[in-house]
Amino acid sequence: MNRFSYKNVYNSEKHKKFIDSQRYVIDDKFLDRTENYELSDGFSVEYSIYSDIEQKNKQYSIKKAVASKIILKNADKTVYEYYCFYDHVKPFTEIIHHKNGHRYYAFHVDLYGISFLDVDTLEVYNYIPEGYEHNKEYRCGESFIITDVHYDKESNLIAYGGCYWASPYEVMVGDFSNPLNFNPHLVSLRDILDPEYNYEDIDFKEWKDGKLYILCDKEEKFLSADELKKLINELTVKGK
């Protein structure tokens, strides 16, 4: 692949221009459906999907704009509200209890990247990587799509399950010592354990006793947190 850029394009001119072009769809006349999810600690999520679809004929339609409005609640009171201007992005359904004593909620404002909200202070950090080299007319290039998050309080590392586009699934690991300004350099477990792509999918299993356990298809493998920290440091220094 081409060189990867860790530059944060959230709130860049291209990003804001794209959001402005899609914002009109947040209107009751475009409301598709609303779903509700229960989280831990008394939190819940109200997830509303909006879409503007132009039906050309019975077989062909154009999706002109799509967005989701997500409301994080506690005891039925709104805590935080945000929007995601991409479809097929489900809200996360867990509250992270960090080693620093604060609680965090992970969410998506785009297909790529990840955001974290401190639910105790309402401070937030949004990150969308510029990604791999791409057409300069597009706001960002391809990067890892995060579908699930798994924080380890003992090591302060976080494991992300996900993929590049639809498949194959794998696990990336990063330093989560500072949730509101986290290190974006992620270590690919496939690059380490399966560089020849012999396994179809790599999935998170658990953090246990200072180790990260994963399933390569159905075969269990593990790496120690110390090994992962070393790899993350090396990747950060190289600036890849």
Image (cartoon, helix red, strand yellow):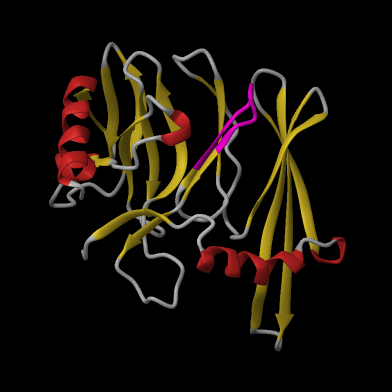
Q: Which residues are magenta?
A: 115-124
Of the pair 58 and 190, the residue shown nearer to us: 190
Among all residues in the image, which is located at the extreme front? 13
Q: Does 38 sit above or below residue 10? A: above
Relative to 96, 177 lies left or right = left
Please tell me in which quadrant of the rendered image residue 179 appears.
Answer: top left
- Is residue 194 something one can see in this rendering? no
Residue under the point 35% across and 21% down = 156
The quadrant holding residue 174 is: top left
Query: Residue 116 magenta-drawn?
Result: yes
Q: Is residue 77 rendered magenta in the image? A: no
- In the image: residue 156, left or right of residue 76: left
Examine the rendered structure and indicate whether residue 60 appears above or below residue 22: below
Residue 151 drawn at (x, y percent): 42, 25
Image quarter for residue 7?
bottom left
- Please state which of residues 68 and 16 is positioned toward the viewer in this rendering: 16
Residue 168 point in image, percent of width and height: 32, 53
Can residue 161 be seen? yes
Residue 180 higher or lower than 156, as above or below: below
Q: What residue is shown at x 22% (from left), y 44% (from top)?
A: 190
**Residue 204 position within the rendered picture, expressed as x and y whole percent measured from the top left:** 36, 32
Instruction: Locate the N terminus and report the quarter of the image it occupies.
Output: bottom left
Residue closest to the far bottom: 57
- Furthest-right residue in view? 29
Question: Residue 59 at x, y = what percent?
Answer: 65, 84
Residue in the image at 48% along x and 33% along y: 180
